[in-house]
Amino acid sequence: MSLPTIISSCMALPAKTPLRRATAGRNAMKLYDFTHKAKNVKKATATRRKRPATIVVRRAPGSRHRALLRCGPLCFPAAIGRSGISAMKREGDGATPLAMMKVTGGLARRRIPILPETPLRLRRIGPNDGWCDAPSDPNYNRPVRLPYAPSHEKLTRDDGIYDIIIILDWNMRCRAREKGSAVFFHLARPGFLPTAGCVAIAPSAMRVLLPHLRRGTRLVVLR
């Protein structure tokens, strides 16, 4: 083989190598894109599974203290405040606030021995547990230990409506005087009698709903 032929052959070899590398690079990028997209799909699916549920409460036809509560496909009759729904909630007005409220925690009486499994942490209510509803007090709209001199609600009630309490964040983060206190999601009285401003459902409905509740679940009250 002549020297020019050898030189031509040697010069031709590197020209093919980058082409193969480039092809491999494109294939690797396609594989990376596919894997990256698959990971994003899995992450989005996991996020949807962990996303807190939204509960929607709307006034039902008829009495202004009757409502319908929906959570996904679930629908239950509910009781709301004796004054209906108000966008200008005030302490003692008997109205349920027109608002989006988030679940921050839960309470349950010790006399309920068995509760359904729920992602929401439920603290047991004791005889010394109360909730301050005195607007001028520093502990306004906060849990307090009894005995407590300023006006308050006792959480151990004989009528059983506070046997399970879901705490909502109404007027909790930036508390304002007279803006309302102890706006809970709790158990309804027989016949769905009006509340003082809370949202209430039957004990059987609460047991169905508890497994769907967690910290951050939104309760939206609409007209």
Image: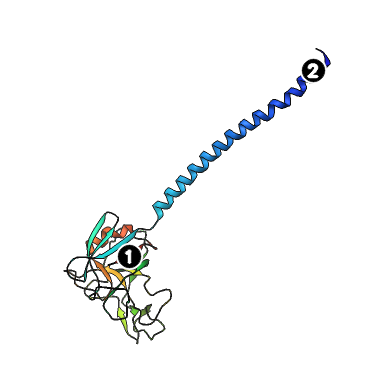
Amino acid tagged 1: Val
* Label number found at residue 6: 2
Callout 2 secondary element: helix
Q: Position of residue 84 (x, y in %)?
A: 24, 73
The residue carrying mark 1 is 220
State the mark number for residue 27: none
Quadrant of the rendered image containing residue 215: bottom left
Q: Is residue 29 above or below residue 67?
A: above
In the image, what residue type sits under mark 2? Ile
Q: Quadrant of residue 68?
A: bottom left
Label 1 neighbour load within 10 Å: few <14, some 14-19, many 20+: some
Which of these two is toward me, 52 or 24? 24
- The residue at 26%/65% (across/down) is 58
Residue at (79, 17) in percent of width and height:
6
Question: Are the two marked residues, 2 and 1, in contact with CB atoms closer than 8 angstroms?
Answer: no
Q: According to the image, what is the colour scheme of the structure?
A: rainbow
Residue at the image point whose x is 65% and y is 28% from the top: 20
Between 110 and 49, which is closer to the camera in this rendering? 49
- Lateral position of residue 34 relative to residue 14, left or right: left
| Image coords of residue 140 (percent x, y) | 38, 81
Classify mark 2: residues with Cα within 10 Å, few (<14), some (14-19) or many (20+).
few
Mark 1: which secondary structure?
Answer: strand
Quadrant in which the N terminus appears = top right
Q: Which circle's residue, 2 or 1, is located before the other in the chain?
A: 2
Marks 2/1: CA distance? 82 Å
